[in-house]
Amino acid sequence: MIRYCFFALLLATACFLACSDDIITPENEVRDFSRLYISFEEYGTSSVGIPDINIRIIGRADSVDFDFDETGYVSQARGGGVIYFNPFLQAVMHASYNTTEQRDSALYVVNINNQAILNNSASMSSPFFKKIRGLTYHRASDALFVVNSDGNRSGIFVVNRPTSVDATRKPFKQFFTGDLPMWGAAYSANRLFVSKQGENGGIYVFEDIATRGVNTADSTANISPARTLAIEDARNLHGIFYDTLHNVLAVTDYTDGQTVGTGRILIFDSFSTMISNQQITPTRIITGPATMLTQPVDVALDTRENGQYLYVADRSRRILRFRLSDNGNVEPEQNLPTPGTPVGLALDTRDDSTLPRF
């Protein structure tokens, strides 16, 4: 009987580890650190053929010495776009920004070893990866959700086992959304949250996204948001980040993208209580001349129990660090000028507080 209970406990533990959405660090890899990956969009700017660095790293993003590591990295992306990290993948997922001049319909896997050294690995290609604007991962099904916003070719595409794919691998589920103006991606409890762009901005909520079926003949299906959480005065929503541990959602917004201080970070505390609403109101907004926010395109939050900071990539060529408790017209705690145009953030934060609790 004792032996049976022991094995039952092991099975329950394994099941918890396989199914929890909020685990953000693998077993046996617990270290106290905060590492920020930044994606840059420049490509082919050198007249002598020197490749543009499209990933730079701040090795200790929560330290006083808030600066880039000495060496950057060149992924295979032809001009960096959305960047995503999950420790269970042990890799950075990097999409190309894609402009009218430079088209690249691939998504790249950049492995990270125990010394935090990056190495180009696999890639995946699809004709529906022309404008990747959001990435997020569901560990239990080992599935990567790819948000592509490209007119009538827009959709949410699901890639199985994303770190083991090759160039010929296609998404095993293709959900077409119609011409939805989408950007960013965050996942929790079988829901996918995506920013709705435009004058009447908000948050699209897609339900049952991990378990929804597709046509067996072609692996496709049409999908519509279960609802849209309208945000008053939202005009140009971009990056979105959901800290499920602290139940805080943050999203970037800006107007003309030229006037310093008009950019905004909208913060929704206790976000899970708002998911069933038709309209949601930020509990806090970081904005104003002191913030230096001009064209914020992505945001990341430190999810550790004692995490202190949120990070913003601003296309005005700066990375800004604010305190998680900030509100209103506040100066950034750190303001780091960048050598190129930052367009995406991926934050890796780990300590004992990020382990699952039983």
Image (cartoon, rainbow, N blue to C red):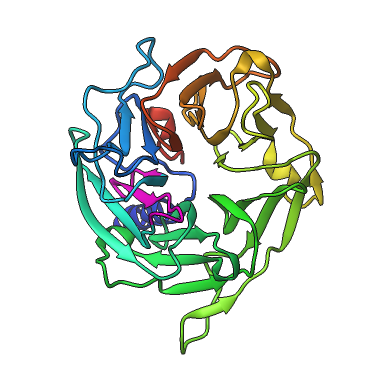
Residue 92 drawn in magenta: yes
Name which residue lies at 35% across and 50% down: 93
Tell me where the magenta segment starts and ends, as one range: 84-102
Q: Is residue 4 visible?
A: no
Please indicate whether residue 48 sits to the left or right of residue 224 in the image.
left
Location of residue 270 by image quarter? top right
Q: How many marks?
A: 0
Please indicate whether residue 196 sits to the left or right of residue 95 in the image.
right
Name which residue lies at 27% across and 65% down: 165
Residue 196 drawn in magenta: no
Near-viewer residue (21 or 240): 240
Locate residue 291, reporting x and y percent.
61, 17
Above or below, comparing residue 69 to residue 142 in the picture: above
Work out which residue is located at the far bottom of the displayed protein and give it: 217
Near-viewer residue (241 or 83): 83
Locate residue 227, reporting x and y percent.
74, 59
Locate residue 28, reporting x and y percent.
25, 38
Location of residue 287 by image quarter? top right
Name which residue lies at 28% across and 46% down: 90
Locate residue 124, reporting x and y percent.
31, 64
Work out which residue is located at the far front of the displayed protein and give it: 47
